[in-house]
Image (cartoon, rainbow, N blue to C red):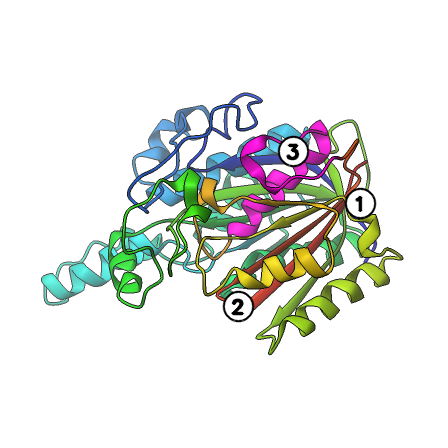
């Protein structure tokens, strides 16, 4: 079992006002077009004016979030940078491919190609932070962020002190249109904050960047500790999911009775949400059930936003009403189980504890 690690710094740029200040969904923002975009920040606070002209949108979003997390943790150096992304810098990838098509592969601008790689984000953070050590980006679809966090936890156990871990994804009109043809998204426009009220196939598309500074040592900045993370690929039944959850808890000398909050990746798709409801009924009937994708939308590394939400709950010891799917009385929140799956193929479980 990997020893627990501490989350000492966090930052999120999302479709909600999560970046500046200390607001925790006091006034959630609603969307009506099933296509959620982040609330842009003042990137000039974190990026050199000369650099910012050449940076793509996702690089500006991710780099600013990473710097904010490092600032929040109060650290001056990093031992490693580990990120996860399903599509990477997809907008730059599309720009380069479309320019090849439209210009017959002649006189191409290389900037979009250079910024299109999945490790562009971790690379630019490393260059600006002068971090010359371990740098890795996981591209494991719906388990990209969980893979990066497990890697970071292993390195903490092996002696690294401060590691930056992040998950990022950007929305793309072309990608949206292609995946809409295979029923990824709602056919009718809905109010994002009423996501679960629409009992039809599909969900809402989202994007965001969420970064964390983790360490093997607790300090005055600590939000919570991550006890363990588990992953499950293509479960054949809900019983297999249930067993994975119980095995994770037992591995950490806990039972379902110890969990105070079941934080889920409910996304409003009636073909995909039943697993969460079944787990809530079978394992956590007396516990509060929360969800977060009505605030950030669906994307490969959405669990990183879920981890930001869980960290805020544990630090503040309060749960905003907008997060509740099922509300149960609770005096305090000690343990949270974060459960997310991407199209019932990639299941990720993260067990967190209040410190």
**SS at mark 3 in the image:** helix
Q: Residue furthest bottom?
A: 236
- Does residue 175 show up? yes
Q: Position of residue 67 (x, y in %)?
A: 54, 34
Q: Secondary structure at mark 1?
A: loop
Magenta span: predominant SS is: helix
Q: CA distance from mark 1 to mark 2?
A: 32 Å
Could you tell me if residue 151 is visible in this image? no
Q: Which residues are magenta?
A: 302-329
**At 80% from the left edge and 45% from the top edge, which residue is drawn?**
216
- Name the one closer to the observer, 224 or 61: 224
* Label number found at residue 344: 2
Find out whether residue 309 is within the magenta segment.
Answer: yes
- In this view, the mark in front (1 or 2): 2
Residue at horizontal 56%, vertical 35%? 11
Could you say where residue 33 lies in the image, as x and y percent from the top left? 28, 43
């Amino acid at each position: 079992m990997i020893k627990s690690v501490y989350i000492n710094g966090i930052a999120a740029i999302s479709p909600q006002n999560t970046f500046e200040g200390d607001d925790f969904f006091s006034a959630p923002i609603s969307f009506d077009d099933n296509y959620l975009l982040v609330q842009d920040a003042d990137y000039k606070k974190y990026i050199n004016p000369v650099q910012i002209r050449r940076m793509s949108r996702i690089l500006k979003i991710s780099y600013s979030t990473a710097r904010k997390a490092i600032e929040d943790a109060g650290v001056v150096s990093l031992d490693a940078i580990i990120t996860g992304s399903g599509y990477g810098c997809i907008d730059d990838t599309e720009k380069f491919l479309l320019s090849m098509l439209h210009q017959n592969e002649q006189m191409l601008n290389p900037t979009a190609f250079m910024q299109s790689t999945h490790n562009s984000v971790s690379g630019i953070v490393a260059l600006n932070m002068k971090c010359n050590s371990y740098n890795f980006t996981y591209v494991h679809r719906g388990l990209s962020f969980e893979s990066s966090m497990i890697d970071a936890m292993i390195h903490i156990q092996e002696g690294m002190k401060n590691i930056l871990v992040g998950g990022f994804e950007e929305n793309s009109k072309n990608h949206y249109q292609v995946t809409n043809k295979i029923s990824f998204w709602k056919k009718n426009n809905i109010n994002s904050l009423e996501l679960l009220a629409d009992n039809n196939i599909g969900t809402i598309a989202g994007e965001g960047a969420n970064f964390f500074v983790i360490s093997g040592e607790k300090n005055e900045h600590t939000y919570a500790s991550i006890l363990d993370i588990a992953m499950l690929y293509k479960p054949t039944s809900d019983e297999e999911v249930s067993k994975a959850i119980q095995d994770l808890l037992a591995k950490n000398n806990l039972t379902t009775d110890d969990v105070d909050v079941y934080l889920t990746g409910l996304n409003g798709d009636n073909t995909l949400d039943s697993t969460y409801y079944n787990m809530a009924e079978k394992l956590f009937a007396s516990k509060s059930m929360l969800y977060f994708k009505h605030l950030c939308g669906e994307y490969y590394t959405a669990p990183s936003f879920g981890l930001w939400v869980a960290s805020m709950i544990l630090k503040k010891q309060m749960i905003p009403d907008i997060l509740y799917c099922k509300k149960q009385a609770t005096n305090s929140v000690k343990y949270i189980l974060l459960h997310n799956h991407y199209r019932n193929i990639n299941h990720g479980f993260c067990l967190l504890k209040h410190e």
